[in-house]
């Protein structure tokens, strides 16, 4: 039996790197359940190798990406022919430079860089042929529970969970929380609970439109000032009052609602109407 707690205590964790090692055996087993013998795994934030040493037993090949030199030294102790250790920042790592294949991503990452890493892996919504995303089948991601709720949220979710992160992840992936993880499952224990989220990558975006860049511009403007209604938020984002009013009416959207009440499909319709009236005006 692995005593992950004692092993983690012996490792000098670095707060600046946001290191919280997963030490709960059942959660590690749940991650491994997502792995098939034919999978090529890219593990982000491999740390001291607690998950890595199990991945190599169940996957065809494992690439462990880690930035910390001390963690790299621990990873090198794993004796497995199918393990390749990459000492690099994931944000500076392109999947095409790792191997020309399709990857399953396993990631336990510092929470403060969750959004940049997802953006690096998925690309913006108007990046239709993002090379990293095209090489990923799915992502199993450990994130702060609150962030997990934002990732899977939609326009019907409670509170302020639904936003640009929801749209970014759902635009090219089907999302679900597969396990809530208590803070004591980590060492050192963070202040909040976490969750394992699965992102199943789709070949095509969730909606079709003739101008994805304009859609991205519309969504960004709509969420730029969350406390304002959709009309004022779009004005604040650079759209003219007249065009906004026409587009909202033709889209069947009330001026008084906020961005978090609009589905991705409704945003697409709104962007198309805004562009149409903008062309008419010019």
Image (cartoon, rainbow, N blue to C red):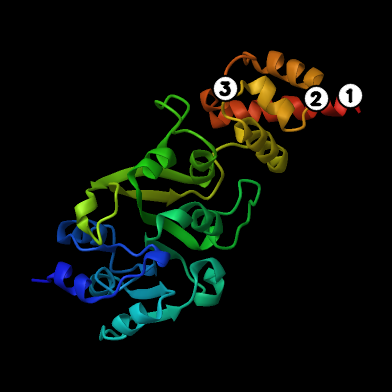
User: Which residue is under mark 2?
Assistant: 240
Horizontal side, residue 142 vs residue 88: left or right:
left
Question: Where residue 38 sits: x, y (%)?
Answer: 33, 68
- Image quarter for residue 75? bottom left
Q: Which quarter of the image is occupied by the N terminus?
A: bottom left
Question: Where residue 157 sits: x, y (%)?
Answer: 41, 27
Residue at the image point whose x is 61% and y is 20% from the top: 229
Question: Where residue 126 sits: x, y (%)?
Answer: 66, 47
Residue at the image point whose x is 55% and y is 62% from the top: 132
Residue 122 vs residue 6, the one in the foreground: 6
Residue found farthest to the right: 282
User: Which residue is under mark 1?
Assistant: 281
Q: How many marks?
A: 3
Question: Where residue 257 sits: x, y (%)?
Answer: 57, 17
Horizontal side, residue 12 vs residue 43: left or right:
left
Q: Residues within 10 Å of mark 1 (few under 14, many from 20)?
A: few
Q: Residues within 10 Å of mark 2 (few under 14, many from 20)?
A: some
- The reply to whether residue 68 is visible in this rendering is yes
- Image quarter for residue 272? top right
User: Which residue is under mark 3?
Assistant: 258
Residue 113 vs residue 217, the one in the foreground: 113
Q: Earlier in the sequence, mark 2 or mark 1?
A: 2
Vertically, is 218 above or below 102?
above
Query: Badges 2 and 1: C-beta atoms under 8 Å apart?
Result: yes
CA–CA distance in space, label 3 to label 1? 25 Å
CA–CA distance in space, label 2 to label 1? 10 Å
Which structural element holds mark 3?
Answer: loop
């Amino acid at each position: 039996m692995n005593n992950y707690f004692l092993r983690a205590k012996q490792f000098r964790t670095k707060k600046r790197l946001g290191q919280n090692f997963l030490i709960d055996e059942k959660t590690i087993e749940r991650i491994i359940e997502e792995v098939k013998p034919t999978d090529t795994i890219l593990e982000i934030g491999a740390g001291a190798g607690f998950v890595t040493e199990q991945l190599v037993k169940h996957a065809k090949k494992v690439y462990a990406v880690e930035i910390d030199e001390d963690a790299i030294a621990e990873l090198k102790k794993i004796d497995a022919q199918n393990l390749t250790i990459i000492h690099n920042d994931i944000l500076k790592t392109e999947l095409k430079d790792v191997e020309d294949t399709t990857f399953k991503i396993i990631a336990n990452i510092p929470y403060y860089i969750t959004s940049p890493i997802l953006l690096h892996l998925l690309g913006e919504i108007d990046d239709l042929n993002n090379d990293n995303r095209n090489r990923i089948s799915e992502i199993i991601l450990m994130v702060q529970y609150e962030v997990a709720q934002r990732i899977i949220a939609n326009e019907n979710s409670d509170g302020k969970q639904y936003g640009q992160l929801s749209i970014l992840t759902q635009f090219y992936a089907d999302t679900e929380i597969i396990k809530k993880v208590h803070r004591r499952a980590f060492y050192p224990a963070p202040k909040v609970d976490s969750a394992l989220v699965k992102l199943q990558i789709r070949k095509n975006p969730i909606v079709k439109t003739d101008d994805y860049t304009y859609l991205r511009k519309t969504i960004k403007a709509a969420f730029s000032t969350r406390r304002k209604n959709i009309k004022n938020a779009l004005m604040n984002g650079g759209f003219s009052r007249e065009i906004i009013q026409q587009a909202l009416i033709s889209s069947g959207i009330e001026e008084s609602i906020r961005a978090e009440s609009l589905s991705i499909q409704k945003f697409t319709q709104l962007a198309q109407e805004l562009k149409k009236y903008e062309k008419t005006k010019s």
